[in-house]
Amino acid sequence: MEIHSIKRQLRTKLYVKWVERHPPPGPLSPQEQTHEEAHHIAHSYAKDSPCNLPLHHAGHCLPFHAISIELHKDVLINKITKSITNAIHANDIKHKIMADTKWLTTDLGGVDWPAIERAIQNAPRPARVKLTKLMFGLNHTNYLDNKYYKTSPICPCCLKDTETFQHILNCPSKSAHEIRTEARDTVQQTLEQIFTPSQMTAVIVSQAYDPPKAISSTIHQQILLVSKAQNSIGWHNFVLSWISTKWRLLYEKLYTPSKNPKPSVWSSKLISALWTYVHSIWKGRNQIAHGKTINEQTEKHLRESHLTVTCLYNDIIADPLLVLQHLCYLINRPLPALLQMSEDATNCWIATIEEAKRTQALIHKNSAQSARCLARFLGKENSEPSGEGQVTPYHEYTSFSHQNTPSKSTQNRANWQQQTTTLKNSEP
């Protein structure tokens, strides 16, 4: 990261120190002798210059300057990029998380952040973005589709409620419940493999994977305190890996060094198991929504296309002016013939009709805007005085124009009456 970018975003101190040059062994060439003389001159100048330079003076450091950065009264020795990035973005991320989760500062401090960091570092690099989206519930649900693309927000599993990410984790449909049960058994086996105490496993399973229940009074008092601490953070957030630090502290009390993993390792593996659980539910939801195999996906896409064609065809029947005259060949076919088209032809037909609907909506919008502008213009002109100092209403202009310039139908009717009268007078 450049020094000036650090200066713009952080209040930090930069220490610049002179580093002695080590001349190469053996005789020096004429060019190296010139460099050595320049080095001695610069060294004599550096003795008189201050060693602690302000940050804005340190932007033009020379190659023989050693630079050290002090951040929050600590000199950065390693992980400099990570420390600076954290100092720049940490406050904004904290405010964002607190605003989304409605947490207090104590709740934010009670989350086991070292365990989350260790779990992310242990995950494969390509999967880290996916895991981060799972943590914050940013998966592409129907609720987000409705928010940005105005599609149906209904859950594809239960076909009743709006599909938010929290609804996916607690969907009441039978298929979703079977997926959660299978994923819960997998996580329970993982907890047993990392030697989680049975009472802790029972509390985690009963509170996190099912609708929250009242905690039994027979549970150990320490586990009861940990459960209360997790209540303030939220059991829904627990499933998303926002676990309390007291889980690790409780496991540390029950820790047996001979066979059990260390508390820090246990907490990171617990978070990885929670990620596996949530990802299994999301994967099962996608299989229900889009099909498990390629054939199921093709059939589901075909049914959706036929449903869209049927709806658009009914819109055309209700409004024949929706399609322009030179495109009427698109609708001069019965609905069964349209449903038998190929996939590419169906997609083109849908795109054309949807474009026609958007064009019609735009024309109606522009027409309404033009009518409003005309109404304002006429209202302004009616309010202006005429040449004789009187206001001439709009209907007088209209009646005057009709009196002086008769319409074509009126002229034809008058000519016909005149010809009929002439013929009657000419009869014997």
Image: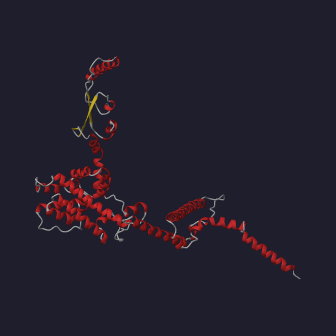
User: Is 45 above or below relative to 236?
Assistant: above
* The one of 192 and 101 positioned closer to us in this rendering: 192
User: Is 33 above or below relative to 96?
Assistant: above
Q: Quadrant of residue 41?
A: top left
Which quadrant of the rendered structure holds the C terminus?
bottom right
The residue at 31%/70% (across/down) is: 175
The residue at 31%/31% (across/down) is: 58
Q: Is residue 263 left or right of residue 344?
A: left
Q: Is residue 374 visible?
A: yes
Residue occupying the far right of the picture: 428
Q: Quadrant of residue 270?
A: bottom left
Image coordinates for residue 219, horizontal then vertical, percent: 12, 65
Image coordinates for residue 68, horizontal then vertical, percent: 25, 34
* The one of 8 and 31 positioned closer to us in this rendering: 31
Q: Is residue 84 left or right of residue 250?
A: right
Image coordinates for residue 217, horizontal then vertical, percent: 12, 68
Q: Is residue 18 left or right of residue 250?
A: right
Image coordinates for residue 279, horizontal then vertical, percent: 29, 60
Snapshot colouring: secondary structure
Please state the total of marks drawn on the protein image: 0
